[in-house]
Image (cartoon, rainbow, N blue to C red):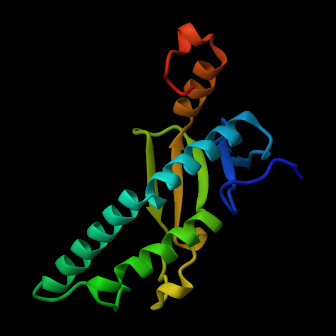
């Protein structure tokens, strides 16, 4: 086990092998630590006051759109728009402490989340990120970040430093 403290709880990063199988990366590997840093920074943005407010606004818009349909679409939120901040806070806590599995793969795009089949239940308190979705990041982007970081400051510039 690594003595490096985890900034993202439950983080498991799988690397895609040539035969398309996935192997977990050790927490002390450069690729794992790069992914952890990226996710930690992204979560810090979402956890900021502006990030939280953006999530609250987006969630309230989605709930309103689903409820406004002739046949309302199913969703888990039962509270008022004024209480959405409580749900967003819970969601961010759950994501920070139990991040969905991460797969480094080769696909068209930079990153994608994929909802797993099945129900999440009918209570947001029971939401489990690792059961609900997984995250894919393009392995070349991670490799390019590591390459840029290893270059001199003149070559790397401000990218990924």
Given residues 137 and 18, the one toward you in this image is 137
In the rendered structure, the answer to whether residue 118 lies left or right of residue 33 reads: left
Q: Quadrant of the C terminus?
A: top right
The residue at 56%/86% (across/down) is: 126
Which residue shows up at 29% across the image and 89% down it? 80
- Furthest toward the top, the residue is 154
Residue 89 placement (x, y as % from top left) = 48, 74
Q: Residue at x 48, y 90 (%)?
A: 123
Looking at the image, residue 154 lies above or below residue 91? above
Q: Is residue 98 visible?
A: no
Work out which residue is located at the far front of the displayed protein and give it: 49
The picture places residue 158, in percent across and down from the top left corner, at: 49, 21
Residue 67 visible somewhere in the drawing: yes
Q: Is residue 67 or residue 117 the one in the foreground?
A: 67
Residue 144, above or below 82: above
Residue at 33%, 91% (x, y): give it. Answer: 79
């Amino acid at each position: 086990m690594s003595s490096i403290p985890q900034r993202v709880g439950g983080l498991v990063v799988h690397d895609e092998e040539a035969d398309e199988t996935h192997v977990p990366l050790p927490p002390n590997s450069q690729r794992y630590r790069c992914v952890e840093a990226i996710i930690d920074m992204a979560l810090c943005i979402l956890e900021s006051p502006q990030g939280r407010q953006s999530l609250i606004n987006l969630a309230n818009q989605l709930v309103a759109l689903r409820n406004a349909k002739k046949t309302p679409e199913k969703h888990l939120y039962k509270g008022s728009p004024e209480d959405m901040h409580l749900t967003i806070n819970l969601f961010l806590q759950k994501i920070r402490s139990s991040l969905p599995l991460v797969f480094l793969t080769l696909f068209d795009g930079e990153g994608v989340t994929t909802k797993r089949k099945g129900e999440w239940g009918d209570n947001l308190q029971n939401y489990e990120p690792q059961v609900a979705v997984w995250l894919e990041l393009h392995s070349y982007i991670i490799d390019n970040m590591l390459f840029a970081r290893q270059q001199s400051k003149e070559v790397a510039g401000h990218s990924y430093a």
